[in-house]
Amino acid sequence: MFDKLEAAQERYEQINEMLMDPAVIGDQDRYRDLMKEYKNLTPIVEKFKEYTAAKNDQEEARTMLDEGGLDADFKEMVQEQLEDAKARLAVLSEELRVLLLPRDPNDDKNVIIEIRGGAGGDEAALFAGSLYRMYTMYAESRGWKTEILSQSETELGGFKEVSFLITGDGAFSRFKYESGVHRVQRVPETETQGRIHTSTVTVAVLPEAEEVDIDINPTDLQIDTYRASGAGGQHVNKTESAIRITHLPTGLVVECQDERSQFKNKDKAMKVLRSRLLEQKQRAQEDEIAAERRSQVGTGDRSERIRTYNFPQGRVTDHRIGLTLYKLDSILNGSLDELTDALITYDQAEKLKSAG
């Protein structure tokens, strides 16, 4: 571990010097990449400094006790310093192990979230709308921007499906644990007998792929235009602004009809297509990794029931980590940090076990 930490510190100092070089400052791409690496190394280097300071405190106290000749009160104070340093070292050592875990290369990326109503008809579509609201409120609380890519609304105000982009530093790292089946248990407004209904909604979370991540050959694309349907004003019947892109090698189909401009719809559809192709590529890579080394949280399996929202009891249960919170209202209003932090902690613990 200490070889890695010393190498990280050396690289950190090296980058620090490079960032002051006029040649590097003038090369925007290189400067941006170095700043990103510098930012990722900063918490490791700062924590290592804390560890080194605690180590020095421990050695200083031990040397004083070994040399002897201390009066009783001072000896007690030095003994306390030694115990305090030992306790700090144990905590800092664990924190450093977590910081040295391999980073998910997608963590800093923007995120595309796709929500689809599952079993339960209108009730599922309404809950899909509730999840969309929850995610956008959470994004807003962190100062991130949200942009709808495509949507299919129902008459009652829910979504058959909705796809949207969240732009912000580290967005994927916070949303990646949301992928899977979300189950809701509540009494629908249309239910006269007061019976609880169970509905499901599927959520897919994709890191936004940049052009450098996925190289798409234009000849692999079939692009069709058609007239948009649904809400949106009279223009929808006059212009063929809606876009359907089919990626012929994989059969993936992406549609976008949200904008009046055909160009904008094509741009949004390509964003989604790139991200889906990146996800497909990464899934294939992950499937090659031994099962015991794969994280147990956020496997991204859309058939996996990950969470239940129970309205009569006001509770939310995450089945992956067995966590139940009686804070349904605040969670649906975007207070996701407690859930997300617990999932991250569990994920890190599993990775530490795998790392041995």
Image (cartoon, rainbow, N blue to C red):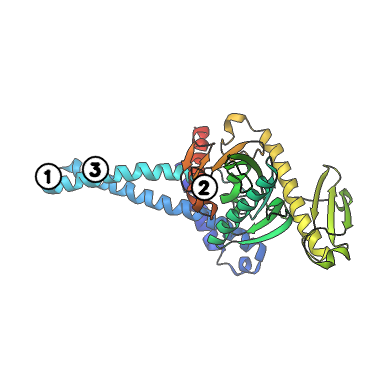
Asked whether 206 or 331 is in front, the reply is: 331
Q: CA distance from mark 2 to mark 3?
A: 41 Å
Task: Read off the residue under disc 3.
Answer: 62
The image shows residue 148 at horizontal and vertical percentages of 70, 59
- Mark 3 or 1 closer to N-term? 3
Judging from the image, what secondary structure is the residue with disc 2 in? helix
- Mark 1 or 2 closer to N-term? 1
Asked whether 186 or 344 is in front, the reply is: 186
Judging from the image, what secondary structure is the residue with disc 1 in? loop
**Which amino acid type corresponds to the residue marked 2 in the rendered image?**
Thr
Asked whether 272 or 258 is in front, the reply is: 258
The vertical placement of 336 against 87, above or below, is below
Judging from the image, what secondary structure is the residue with disc 3 in? helix
Residue 69 numbered mark, or none: 1
Q: Give the number of marks.
A: 3
**Is disc 3 surrounded by few (<14), some (14 to 19) or many (20+) residues within 10 Å?**
some
Task: Read off the residue under disc 2.
Answer: 340
Which residue sits at x=50%, y=48%?
328
Viewed as shown, does residue 36 lie left or right of 159?
left
Q: Is residue 204 visible?
A: no
The image shows residue 172 at horizontal and vertical percentages of 61, 51
**Which amino acid type corresponds to the residue marked 1 in the rendered image?**
Gly
Nearest-to-viewer mark from 2 and 3:
2
Viewed as shown, does residue 72 lie left or right of 30?
left
- Mark 2 or 3 closer to N-term? 3
**Which amino acid type corresponds to the residue marked 3 in the rendered image?**
Arg
Q: Is residue 158 visible?
A: yes
Which residue sits at x=65%, y=44%?
201
| Residue lying furthest front | 192
Viewed as shown, does residue 235 lie left or right of 350?
right
The vertical placement of 39 against 96, above or below, is below
Q: Given contact means CB atoms under 8 Å apart, are the residues at marks 1 and 2 in contact?
A: no
